[in-house]
């Protein structure tokens, strides 16, 4: 059988290994100059025009971003249910309540109309997810936030380099978090990078990251140890020099798949949007699970279901709310390999497999 095509694959080269070795030899391995340089280079690379704060995971980044924006017990933050659980977890960890809204069936991102219908007198913020690397409808969400006096945040975990009408994701909300987990579009091993809209959120994030201290032993608030190490930052700095090429490869892989796939609904891109294809996600209206199983057993092709159980049905959340587009997406979505290591032969195998199986109604 042909070689397995994995659904995701981090790319680690000699440059990353050398960077780690350089930090190890320096003897200074905790948060230091590499982290400071990574923060600056990340903001510059993605044209964010604002400061960035590095932390030890994307989830920590969401948590500290929310805390630093004043989200706390008693408040509600509107989030999608169709996302990775870290989105709602981070809201719950502040003591606030995640309120689940439905998604737009085309972009898989928060539907502004559903968001507006979910607003209560406890709502303090809206946190869309740029799911699969496609930007959420930020102008519509900003307009709703402004009209109701709410804050707007961004879960950009999957969307490094995505943009809408020329504005990069990460430059819209009070804060935006980019995950650096190995399966994301770039990695630092584990880590998160948070872009911040103003100096106050930045300073508070830095306090929370480091036990509440700006100056050693002069603690100002109860804080965490969510620091990134210089080892991880050194990996991330190298990855920054490569992520542009990887994104271009993801986009050209996606273009080939969209051109050639039949029998499934290919992902669509909104007007003015740049999609960075963290995932290439199709809809399979009939028997998605059967197609995924046959791709693996008959063609040795991996795929992913992101996400089969909506967050509002998960044990920690369990709320009784009707989200029909979320339910349909959870049932139908299948992500095919699109990452930069998929070569032309791999793309052709994926097309042949999907088209054959979809035609046979597998
Ligand atoms: C990966 C991810 C996170 C969490 O990031 P970690 O770095 O794994 O903590 C949050 N939200 C979404 C949408 C993600 O995909």
Image: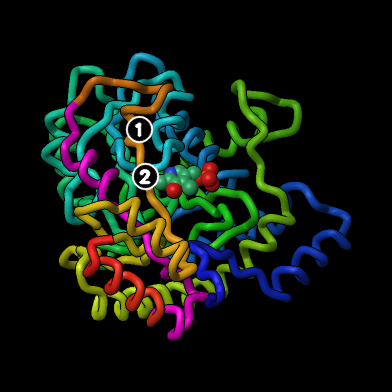
- In the picture, which quadrant includes the N terminus? bottom right
Q: Depth check: 312 or 95 in front?
A: 312
Beta carbon of the mark 1 residue lies under 8 A of ligand 1: no
Q: Depth check: 200 or 47 in front?
A: 47
- 3 relative to 275 in the view: left or right: right
Q: Count neighbours of disc 1 (C-alpha within 10 A) and say few if under 14, some if 14 to 19, many if 20 or more.
A: many
Q: Is residue 146 above or below residue 1?
A: above
Q: What residue appears at the point 62 percent right and 44 percent down from the top-left corner?
A: 56
Label count reads: 2
Q: Name the residue under label 2.
A: 307
Q: What residue appears at the point 44 percent right and 19 percent down from the top-left corner?
A: 95
Q: What residue appears at the point 23 percent right and 39 percent down from the top-left corner?
A: 327
Label 1: element kind: helix
Label 2: element kind: loop
Tell me if residue 163 is in the magenta stretch.
Answer: no
Q: Residue 44 carries which label?
A: none
Label 1, label 2: how many angstroms apart (C-alpha)? 9 Å
Q: Mark 1 points at which residue?
A: 311
The residue at the far bottom in this view is 344
Tell me if residue 338 is in the magenta stretch.
Answer: yes
Residue 316 is situated, as x and y percent measured from the top left of the image, at 43, 22
Indicate the quadrant where residue 41 lies: bottom right
- 96 relative to 221 in the view: left or right: left
Q: Is residue 48 visible?
A: no
Q: What residue appears at the point 31 percent right and 63 percent down from the top-left corner?
A: 163
Which residues lie in the magenta part?
322-347
């Amino acid at each position: 059988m042909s070689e397995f095509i994995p659904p995701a694959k981090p790319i680690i080269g000699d440059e990353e290994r050398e960077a780690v070795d350089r930090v190890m030899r320096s003897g200074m391995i905790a948060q230091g100059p590499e982290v400071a340089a990574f923060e600056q280079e990340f903001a510059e690379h993605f044209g964010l025009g604002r400061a960035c704060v590095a932390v030890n995971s994307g989830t920590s980044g969401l948590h500290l971003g929310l805390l630093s924006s004043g989200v706390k017990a008693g408040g509600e933050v509107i989030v999608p249910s169709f996302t990775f659980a870290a989105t709602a977890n981070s809201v719950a960890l502040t003591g606030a309540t995640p309120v689940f809204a439905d998604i737009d069936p085309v972009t898989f991102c928060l539907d502004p109309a559903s968001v507006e219908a979910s607003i209560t007198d406890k709502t303090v913020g809206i946190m869309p997810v740029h799911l699969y690397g496609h930007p959420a409808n930020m102008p519509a969400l900003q307009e709703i936030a402004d009209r109701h006096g709410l804050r707007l945040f961004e879960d950009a975990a999957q969307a490094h380099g995505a943009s809408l009408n020329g504005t990069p994701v990460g430059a819209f909300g009070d804060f935006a978090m980019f995950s650096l987990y190995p399966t994301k579009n770039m990695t630092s091993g584990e880590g998160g990078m948070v872009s911040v809209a103003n100096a106050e959120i930045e300073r508070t994030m830095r306090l929370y990251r480091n036990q509440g201290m700006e100056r050693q032993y002069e603690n100002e608030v109860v804080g965490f140890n969510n620091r990134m190490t210089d080892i991880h930052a050194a990996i991330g700095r190298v990855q920054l020099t490569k992520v542009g090429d990887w994104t271009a490869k993801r986009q050209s892989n996606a273009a080939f798949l969209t051109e050639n796939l039949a029998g499934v609904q290919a992902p669509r891109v909104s007007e003015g949007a740049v999609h960075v294809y963290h995932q290439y996600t199709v809809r399979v209206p009939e028997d998605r699970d059967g197609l995924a199983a046959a791709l693996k057993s008959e063609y040795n092709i991996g795929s992913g279901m992101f996400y089969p159980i909506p967050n509002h049905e998960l044990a920690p959340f369990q709320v009784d709310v009707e989200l029909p587009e979320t339910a349909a997406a959870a049932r139908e979505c299948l992500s095919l390999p699109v990452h930069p290591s998929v070569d032309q032969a791999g793309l052709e195998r994926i097309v042949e497999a999907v088209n054959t199986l979809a035609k046979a109604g597998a």
